[in-house]
Image: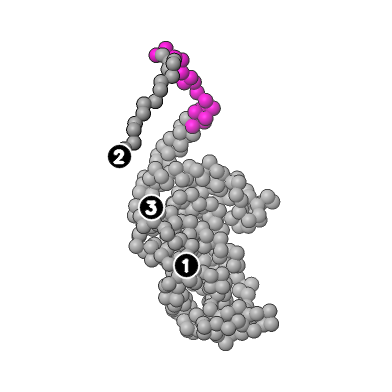
Amino acid sequence: MSEEFVLLEPDDQPGDEWEQLDVSDTEADRIARRQDREFDEFRKRIKDTEQFKLQESVFDDATLAAIYKLVQDGYVDAFGGPVSTGKEASVFEALGGQAGERPEPGSAAAGGGPEGVTPEREVAVKVYRINSSNFRHMREYLEGDPRFEGIASDKKAVVLAWTRKELANLERARKAGVRVPEPIAVQRNVLVMELVGHAEDRARRLSEVDVENPETAYEVVREYMRRLYRAGLIHGDLSEYNMIIHEGELVIIDMGQAVTVHHPNAGEFLDRDCENVAAFFTREGIDVDPDDLRAYVTEPEPEPSGEPEPSGEPVSESGGEPEPSGEPVSESGGEPESGEESDE
């Protein structure tokens, strides 16, 4: 290198060792210290509870920080005990707060209050474990989803993307007219959503009840599958274990793995959903063929003239698009199960 190096010229009076420096507190310093103290108190309070001792693997410092942020933002007022526990996530009950981003006014997640939110409404807080989640299982559903192209390959990035994916899937499903738990907020690996039922009155999985009117239940399920498909989504793990009944309503849960119809494995996932649903309702005494169910789900939407748009998918002979029956789905027997999203 041929460049010449030149020294900077010093100031005439660079200062002296007796110069006074302003080290007094600023407002920002005081706020930061207060927030640090509040977070430390929050972390200690959580760690001293019985549910933490039972679920210690869930509450690492990053997860505690995410929950604390949801508390600070008004999405959660009080944290309750565990509702369900799985290998990838745990679900806890909580009291919802007066958040800035509110659920739909008058909706079940909002508690039905006049302003759309009541401070005493119960919510479900789903916490995904970053360290113990099934990394390869999640990647199978994320890879090929155009919404998550370019996602990093490390486990933390995958779990955080999965949590946001579940929120996005729930939002899209609700807009399509599918009864799913209403999403409320997400922070890192923590998802806040509607608690279907109440802490003392858990909703039950379809697998845990005796369905008194299986024909009605099947009509609702297949219509929800069709609405999901027309909204560009396939559940990907639909079965009697991922559907719950509460007060005559059939609710689809565990939407984290749902993929778009453009996913390279979308057809395989749809076939599996149809086979699972057909097998369950066949055991309930209805003759359901998975190929017929698939044809119904993928039937193109009718044009305004009433004729369906041409499509490469097989078209069923069922004609128009019925609404789910207004008749409530009845159930009896069985023990109460989790009233919100269960673990995958």
SS at mark 3 in the image: helix
- Residue of label 2: 1
Asked whether the residues under the numbered discs 1 and 3 touch, taking CB atoms below 8 Å apart as contact, a structural biologist would say: no
| Image height of 255 relative to 102, above or below | below
* Crowding near the residue tagged with mark 3, few <14, some 14–19, many ≥20 C-alpha atoms within 10 Å: some
Q: Disc 2 to disc 1, how far (Cα)?
A: 57 Å
- Residue of label 1: 259
| Image height of 173 relative to 279, above or below | above
> At 51% from the left edge and 82% from the top edge, which residue is drawn?
313
The image quarter containing residue 14 is top left
Q: Is residue 82 left or right of residue 118?
A: left
Amino acid tagged 3: Lys
| Image height of 251 relative to 218, above or below | above
Q: What stretch is highlighted in magenta?
A: 17-32
* Crowding near the residue tagged with mark 1, few <14, some 14–19, many ≥20 C-alpha atoms within 10 Å: many
> Is residue 92 shown to the viewer in this render?
no
> At 38% from the left edge and 49% from the top edge, which residue is drawn?
58
Most extreme residue toward the left is 1
Of the image marks 1 and 3, the number of the one nearer the N terminus: 3
Of the image marks 2 and 3, the number of the one nearer the N terminus: 2
Residue 83 image position (x, y, % from top left): 45, 54
SS at mark 1 in the image: strand
> At 55% from the left edge and 47% from the top edge, which residue is drawn?
75
Asked whether the residues under the numbered discs 2 and 3 touch, taking CB atoms below 8 Å apart as contact, a structural biologist would say: no
- Residue of label 3: 156
* Crowding near the residue tagged with mark 2, few <14, some 14–19, many ≥20 C-alpha atoms within 10 Å: few
Amino acid tagged 1: Val
